[in-house]
Every structure is written in structure tokens, then in C-alpha cells.
Image (tube, rainbow, N blue to C red):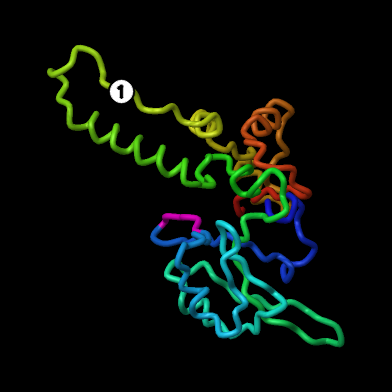
């Protein structure tokens, strides 16, 4: 949703996320285009519709023929082919992937809006810094406790959002009428939140973005 300027699209057909979330065995992980230096999708495109542009890989929509060769070639499974409506009832199939939010002054919207700071835009300097941190962490792990009176290094603190997520209490459920009362009628069995309960639940919000709509999933009766 961040790529749509933090606004919900009007129809499901127009919701075209550029990040894929993989769900398997209770685990979830977001994957996105790696903008490879020697990108397989660039080599596989028969119409030269995918090309290197600076430090990124971009799709030239006007040249894409929707052949799906890039989908087969991508080793990360992040390339998609989407269908968009055209004039006179026609549709156009074209490749769709992360474009690093070209033209957005603040940079990639997903990086800015991720509440857990799990996404980052890595340039050469970032990769060099990351390599240094990993080597330092390996050195810290190899040092035995009795070899130094003081710790060799300290682990970086988690981001503010991560700490906020860790301290957030579990979601509260609305009070439910007793079974003796429920079996005597077919009215709503869940009671509205009291002002205090509503305030407690509102405090759980991580303010990931300015959402246009709010959906609350209540447990089934």
C-alpha cells in the first residue's frame, strides 16, 4: 500500500503490490526485486523491455509484451505479469516489479513505512558497513568471557518500532454475554468496548501509515 501513496485502491483489480509476501509453515517473509547487477530477467527479455538504469533494473512498459520470460528467469520469484484494462474493452499484460519508487524524493516507500525497519536500501557504502558489522560480530562471538574483563563490543539496539512492538500488549477481545443470556435471544453477543478498553486498544496502534480505511476482525461467535 505504501507504493500507492499510502492510499487504498478502489478495487481489488487495481491493487498491484510490488512486494511479495511468502507464507509457509506459519512463517512469513517479504521478498522484493534485488536489482541484480547481471540480472537474468534482462538477459531473458526478447523485446529489450527490461534494462539496467543506473543502479537499478527497470521495466519499460511501452515495450513489454507480457511473454512471462522474466518470470521464469527470475531466481527470487519476484517478477509478476499483471493485466491492466485498456480502451475498448482490451487489456494489456506487462511485467510488474519493484521500481525503487523512481521519482519519489523520499526514496522507496516500503523502507520508509516498514514498522519493524526490516527493509533498507543498500548501496555500496551500506554493504561495506554491513560486512564490517558482521566481521565484528563474529569476532565478539569467538572471544571467550574469561579472556576480557569488559565486553569487546555491544550489539546495536533495535529500532524504536521494534521496541514498541515488543512492549505492545496482546490484543484485547470484547466482552461476551454469558451463555445463559445468549441462549435466550439472537441479538449481538459481543459488548461494545468501554471507553477505557477503547483507549487501551487504540494505544496498540504502531501508526504504520495514514490508512484511508480501518478494518477490525472480530472473533466468530
In the image, 43 versus 180, the foreground residue is 43
User: Residue at coordinates 50% horizontally, 47% vertically from top-left?
Assistant: 123
- Relative image position of residue 34 (x, y in whole percent): 49, 59
In the image, taking residue 220 as reference, residue 129 lies left or right, namely left
* Residue 106, quarter of the rendered image: top right
Q: What residue appears at the point 69 percent right and 78 percent down from the top-left corner?
A: 83
Residue 164 among those drawn in magenta: no
Relative to 7, residue 154 above or below: above
Q: Is 155 located above or below residue 30 in the figure? A: above
Does dot 1 land on a helix, a strand or a loop? loop
Quadrant containing the N terminus in the rendered view = bottom right
Q: Is residue 149 left or right of residue 170?
A: left
**Residue with the mark numbered 1:** 153
Q: Position of residue 39 (x, y in %)?
A: 47, 68
Nearest the camera: 40 or 84?
40
- Image position of 23 (left or right of 97): left
User: Residue 151 is drawn in which quadrant?
Assistant: top left
Up/down of 146 relative to 95, above or below:
above
* Position in image of residue 100 (x %, y %): 62, 55
Q: Percent from the top left, x then y, of residue 141?
A: 22, 32
Left or right: where 147 falls relative to 178: left
Outermost residue toward the right?
88
Q: Which residues are magenta?
A: 26-31
Give the residue at the far top of this rendering: 149
The residue at the far front in this view is 54
Q: Is the stretch drawn in magenta largely helix, strand or loop?
A: strand
* x 77%, y 67%: residue: 11
Amino acid at each position: 500500500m505504501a507504493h500507492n501513496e499510502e492510499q487504498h485502491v478502489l478495487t481489488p483489480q487495481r491493487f498491484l503490490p510490488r512486494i511479495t509476501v511468502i507464507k509457509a509453515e506459519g512463517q512469513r517473509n517479504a521478498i522484493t526485486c534485488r536489482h541484480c547487477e547481471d540480472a537474468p530477467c534482462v538477459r531473458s527479455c526478447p523485446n529489450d523491455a527490461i534494462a539496467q538504469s543506473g543502479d537499478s533494473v527497470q521495466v519499460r512498459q511501452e515495450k513489454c509484451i507480457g511473454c512471462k520470460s522474466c518470470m521464469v528467469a527470475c531466481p527470487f520469484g519476484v517478477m509478476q505479469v499483471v493485466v491492466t484494462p485498456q480502451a475498448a474493452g482490451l487489456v494489456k499484460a506487462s511485467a510488474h516489479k519493484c521500481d525503487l519508487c523512481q521519482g519519489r524524493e523520499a526514496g522507496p516507500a516500503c523502507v520508509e513505512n516498514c514498522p519493524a525497519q526490516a527493509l533498507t536500501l543498500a548501496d555500496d557504502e551500506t554493504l561495506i558497513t554491513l560486512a564490517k558489522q558482521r566481521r565484528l560480530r563474529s569476532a565478539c562471538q569467538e572471544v571467550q568471557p574469561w579472556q576480557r574483563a569488559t565486553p569487546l563490543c555491544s550489539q546495536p539496539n533495535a529500532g524504536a518500532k521494534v521496541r514498541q512492538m515488543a512492549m505492545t500488549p496482546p490484543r484485547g477481545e470484547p466482552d461476551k454475554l454469558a451463555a445463559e443470556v445468549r441462549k435466550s435471544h439472537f441479538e449481538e453477543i459481543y459488548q461494545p468496548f468501554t471507553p477505557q478498553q477503547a483507549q487501551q486498544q487504540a494505544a496498540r496502534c504502531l501508526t504504520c501509515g495514514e490508512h484511508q480505511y480501518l478494518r477490525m476482525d472480530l472473533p466468530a461467535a
